[in-house]
Amino acid sequence: MVKKRCVAMLLAGGQGSRLNSLTKQLAKPAVPFGGKYRIIDFTLSNCSNSGIDTVGILTQYQPLLLHSYIGIGSAWDLDRRNGGVTVLPPYSESSGVKWYEGTAHAIYQNMNYIEQYDPEYVLILSGDHIYKMNYAKMLDYHIAKNADVTISVIEVPWAEASRFGIMNTDKEMRIVEFEEKPSAPKNNLASMGIYIFNWSVLKEYLQIDNENPSSSHDFGKDVIPLLLKEKKRLMAYPFKGYWKDVGTVKSLWEANMDLLDPECELNLFDQSWKIYSVNPNQPPQYISPDAIVINSLVNEGCIIEGTIDHSVVFQGVYVQKGAIVRDCVIMPDVVIGENAYIERAIVPSELEIPPGIVIRPSAFDDEIFLVTQEWLQAQSSEIVEKG
Amino acid sequence: MNKTMLGVIDDTRYMESLYELTLHRSIAAIPFAGRYRLIDFVLSNMVNSGMQSIAIFPKYHYRSLMDHLGSGKNWDLSRKRDGLFFFPSSDLNIPAHHLGAFQHFEQHIDYFLRSKQKYALICNSYTVCNIDYEAVLKRHIDNQCDITEIRHQGRSLGMFVLETSLLLDLIANRIHTGYNSIIDVVHDHLHQLKICDYEHYGYVAVIDSIESYFRHSLELLNPTIWNQLFVKSRPIYTKVKDAPPTKYTENAVVKNSIVANGCMIEGHVENSIIFRAVKIEKGTVVKNSIIMQKSHIGEQCELNSVIVDKDVKVENGVKIVGSEQHPFVVRKGTVQGELMNQ
């Protein structure tokens, strides 16, 4: 195996249970985002654009669609003779089957994968976030600061700091303390869940952590606190730019709506940092003589006969005459029936919204309504009962 | 029984009537329908009909065609066995006979000799349709034809099925027979070969002039025609570009138009075909026009019956008007209205 300077390990096994029905059949990194992408596209494109060509992807929860989507990594130019993408699901060994018990344990179980490239650095990523970041710059920082571990951090509003894992740093940006969701935050630098380790340090501490029976084998909860206790050199790398954890229905909706804001820092049209994805290969979109499309992102394969206002519309969606879609995220291959009205909702893939149905936010307060097959069935039986 | 076909796409023709669109590209590489090139249709039809070995014979300006096709991966033709072959003419002085000129094939005769496929399908590169060649072959075999010509409403579509061995004979004996192309054979009646017709009933567009290119492009706005060309079970493949979804701003007004990915629409677009990554700025009205990839139309422009080729920049406040019979063609890579605004 050819030696690699830096190997990336992408944690993509999360369930994302707060996304409710969206993650019933698929892992969170495979959830559709931004009109044509899946969440994991952002991290994989960042790797590709940063020149990191060796990426181990750790999967566990509902992996079928995620595995087939990743394939051999060609969509992100990561199908390489040396390195490239390797999907790493849990496996059985002579002592039995071991599920990934925590983020650190998942990496521990795949130390052989990393070892074969004999790297100097290991980049740990999660497939849950929407952002554009040049990991090569973070690696330069890690080397310049002579760090054992570098953790990427972002400034969050002070009022929200208690929702995050907060890094308390000294003047030099060395991390002196890590507090998970502090009630009285001393700092507003939140961990983005992106770590660069010197491989020798990571290897040593994964071993120690694995032998500790009281550990939950999690980077944030166990490994980082242990490294701090042992006075290792942990540096914070301040990231500036758009970064969003799309862990809830509301935050997923908000991040989609952010793309419609002309001032949004996350620019999908930037040719120098393209976000790659598996292209669906559909014909262009057709906008009919009666259609109105404003303030929206619309992907190929759509037929728009109704009104789309301030919405994100994925490939293959059919919006029929008289239908109005406002402040919505419409996932692939959805049909919106004639004269339907939908506002502030997420419609998951392949659902058929019957003609004339009304989904208004007032009935659901400030929340974003996640349409489900069950809800649609209940509506149609109600109509039958009333009729 | 061996029922497989070789695909032969003849892109050796030059047409004066397509001059402005073929300045930088061969006919096969003319952009069409918002995100495709003409060759995508014949190539996808062949792939969708189960054909695995396809040879393209280009002659003029094939750089953009090669760039478009690459290894053939987007058509699933990057294979260890068979796949996509590219056979440029090594002699540009070969007289431009009809389609399917045997002299071009003879230069690459090894391809035909080495291939195991019993049948061959010869097609031109400028006929746009969605057709199942397997059905054509079945009819060809059932009726024991020597050559089957595919036609549409009395017009030849420049598509022929024959046995590879017959094609080899025709190529080898062309000096004796005087047949220089497959068309010569089909049009002659002094031979013993059984020539059959196969009628294709779906939509067909033959692109052989600027006027027909313009007319057939805008025809796609008719959903009945669109649905005949873009069938879910028989998709048309093309080079993928990783463009984001198209963005419509608050001032966008789009009516009866086909829009590809990666565009930024801020103006008024009506009855038009907009290719990938086109930008149309505020206050601009585009009607009955075709705007190709990466072109940028500035503010307060007025375009009617115009074909804007790739990478064109139209400065603010420019008015360009053509007509249905004579659409105005803005050539690739040019800047319009540069002098006007000085």
Image (spheres, rainbow, N blue to C red):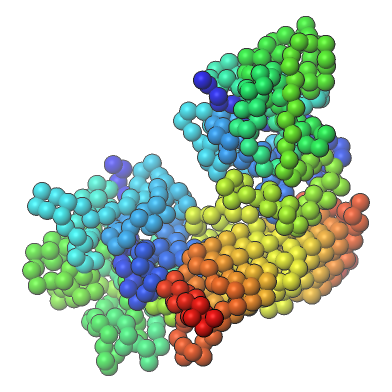
Residue A290 in picture, x, y percent from top left: 74, 71
> On the image, which quarter does residue B328 sit in?
bottom right
Q: Is residue B41 left or right of residue A122?
A: right
> On the image, which quarter does residue A223 sit in?
bottom left
Q: Is residue B84 left or right of residue A132?
A: right
> On the image, which quarter does residue A259 sit in?
bottom right
Question: Does residue B314 appear anywhere in the picture?
Answer: no
Q: Residue A176 versus residue A338: which sits nearer the camera? A: A338
Quarter of the image with the C terminus of chain A in it: bottom right
Above or below for A369 versus B110 = below
**What residue lies at 59% left-to-right and 54% top-to-bottom?**
A282
Q: Residue A311 versus residue A101: which sits nearer the camera? A: A311
Above or below for A156 versus B55 = below
Query: Which residue appears farthest toward the top when viewing the image?
Result: B176
**What residue lies at 19% left-to-right and 65% top-to-bottom?**
A101
Q: Is residue A387 left or right of residue B148?
A: left
How many marks are shown on the rendered structure?
Answer: 0
Q: Residue A236 versus residue B14: which sits nearer the camera? A: B14
Q: Is residue B149 left or right of residue A253?
A: right
**What residue lies at 25% left-to-right and 52% top-to-bottom?**
A114
Question: Does residue B227 appear anywhere in the picture?
Answer: yes
Above or below for A54 versus B164 = below
Residue B300 in picture, x, y percent from top left: 82, 73
Residue A163 in picture, x, y percent from top left: 32, 85
Residue A270 in picture, x, y percent from top left: 57, 65
Quarter of the image with the N terminus of chain A in it: top left
**What residue lies at 42% left-to-right and 73% top-to-bottom?**
A374
